[in-house]
Image (spheres, helix red, strand yellow):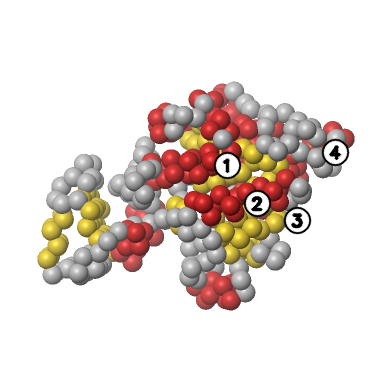
Amino acid sequence: MDALVQECVCVRGKSMKNSSTAFKAVILAGGSGERFWPLSTEENPKQFLRVFGGESLIRQCAQRLKSVAGEKEVFVVTSKRLVAATRSELPELPLTNIVGEPMRRDTAAAVALGVSLVAPGEESASSDPVIGFFSSDQMVLNPAKFIKTLKKAISTARRSEAVVTIGIKPTFPSPAFGYINPSNGAFVEKPSSKKAANYLKKGYLWNAGMFIARASVFKRAFAQFAPELYPLSIKPFSPAARKRFYEKLPKISFDYAVMEKYGNVKVVKGDFGWDDVGSYGAFDKYFPHDAMGNVREGPCTVVESEGNICVARSARISLLGVKNLVVVTTPNAVLVADKSRVSEMKKLVGSMK
């Protein structure tokens, strides 16, 4: 076994059965702004949109987590270009609690960086905080039930060697989400619609990308299953050193790098109105409709048209005799899309680069 890995697995000979009662929350906020283009952009991605719930999604997330961890124990891992915007959106957080990645390397690198941000160095029997990782751009309709579920997950993580994940009770057989088998913690990537329906019959849960474990557990998991990321998880780098390190890293999710290989995964079921609000289809779900089934926000004139989503943030939108479109105007762009294809927004945005 590699010496660096062996050192982590053994934790320098110290027992990790006892741990501190601290909980620290890390928000992963490296959004690219593609799903809600042109409302969201690379400079103003989805987590900053004040569309669902009055406040931005990242502020809603921070508010929920602060009620459990405390204001000074909420951290954010975002992209370098979004550090200033994140600090502006969450001014109550200490400046050092927000760190920027020099480039995108998916969630495995972001989690490793978050671990070292929260718990640099080695753990001891009296100092081994539980760390939770959460996406910045998801919605929770029942925060009280979320907090209750999170506290259960924290308690489970504190007294075990497991990585705990919160699995969401599905509301329909979605092929857009990964799934978790709650009986053994096995992860299943995005399935076909037929397989998704079968998973629901078997009691599988949606994978919402929430991971909770002690700092030492995360570090050992990286050492064993993603050793190329292990150094990033144990010590903070200077910005220049971090950039050099990131340039050598693969793009890989935490699910693939660690969770699919880690043998000790526990699942806590969550049923608190979770929604990843992953496309313009969310407007149909959360906004009122007119008599013809249109959603209208801003100056929209709709005549003999039905089932459209109309969002006017600049020029007036006028629709005549059309069905099932998404039409959005902003000061810089106009979107016209078939509603059935809004899940393909990345294809459109990618073609413009």
Residue 175: assigned label: none
Q: Amino acid at mark 2?
A: Ala
- Is residue 252 among what the camera can see? no
- Closer to the eye: label 1 or 3: 1
User: Could you tell me how many numbered marks the image carries?
Assistant: 4
Residue 68: assigned label: 1
Of helix, strand and loop, which one carries label 4?
loop
Q: Residue at 56% across / 35% down in the picture?
A: 70
Q: Nearer the viewer, residue 313 or 41?
A: 313
* Disc on the earlier residue, 4 or 2: 4
* Disc on the earlier residue, 3 or 2: 2
Q: Is residue 277 above or below residue 46?
A: below
Q: Residues within 10 Å of mark 1 (few under 14, many from 20)?
A: some
* Disc on the earlier residue, 1 or 3: 1
Distance of mark 1 from mark 3, alpha carbons?
28 Å
Q: Residues within 10 Å of mark 3 (few under 14, many from 20)?
A: some
Q: Nearer the viewer, residue 286 or 252?
A: 286
**Residue 134 pos. (x, y %):** 55, 46
Q: Which residue is mark 4?
A: 15
Distance of mark 2 from mark 1, alpha carbons?
12 Å
Q: Amino acid at mark 4?
A: Ser
**Residue 213 pos. (x, y %):** 68, 45
Q: For this view, does 200 lie left or right of residue 52?
A: right
Of helix, strand and loop, which one carries label 2?
helix
Q: For this view, does 160 lie left or right of residue 352?
A: right
* Disc on the earlier residue, 1 or 4: 4
Q: Amino acid at mark 3?
A: Gly
Q: Residue at 61% across / 44% down in the picture?
A: 132
Q: Amino acid at mark 1?
A: Val
Q: For this view, does 172 lie left or right of residue 189?
A: left
Distance of mark 1 from mark 4, alpha carbons?
27 Å
